[in-house]
Amino acid sequence: MSTPETIYLIPGEYEEGLVWCDDPAPDSYSDPDEAVKYVRADIHESALKRQGSAAKMGMDAAKKDASWREENARRLLAEKCDAPVGWIGPDKYRTARESKMKFFKTIKELREQNEKLQARVAELESDEQEMVGDNNV
């Protein structure tokens, strides 16, 4: 005979005290609510391990989800470099703004250089035409 997985401690009918039984209500006079359930230790430990494993899997999934959400939020914030100060930290906003200002200043300088170069090219072309005109005379 194998050891049962669950046994119950129930009030004895004819004996005073409690008796062990494998059924919480072995007869019609017994109340199953009065029985105390005992589970074999190895069965109890395996159930605890399963619950622990399920809890760990749940925590791992929650951590993975949280890290995904954090990464996604950071990506979205990075895309909003024009956002007001409340959207990103003041230092990052200031740095992004300074970077943009430097970029626009460089563009302005390049446009000014381009205008000067175009003026110089026009000047050289007119000098060339004058020289060609002088040679044809």
Image: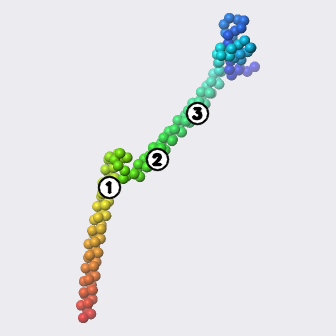
Q: Residue at x 31, y 50 (%)?
A: 94
Which corner quadrant holds the N terminus? top right
Residue at image mark 3: 54
Comes first in the chain, label 3 or label 1: 3
Numbered mark located on residue 19 in the image: none
Q: Position of residue 78 (x, y in %)?
A: 40, 50
Q: Mark 3 to mark 1: distance in Å?
A: 49 Å
Name which residue type carries label 3. Answer: Ala
Residue at image mark 1: 99
Q: Of the residues tagged 3 and 2, which is closer to the observer? A: 2
Q: Position of residue 60 (x, y in %)?
A: 53, 37
Residue in the foreground of this view, choosing between 12 and 41: 12
Does any portion of residue 92 appear in the rendered image?
Answer: no
Disc 2 + disc 1, Cβ < 8 Å: no
Residue at image mark 2: 72
Q: Mark 3 to mark 2: distance in Å?
A: 27 Å
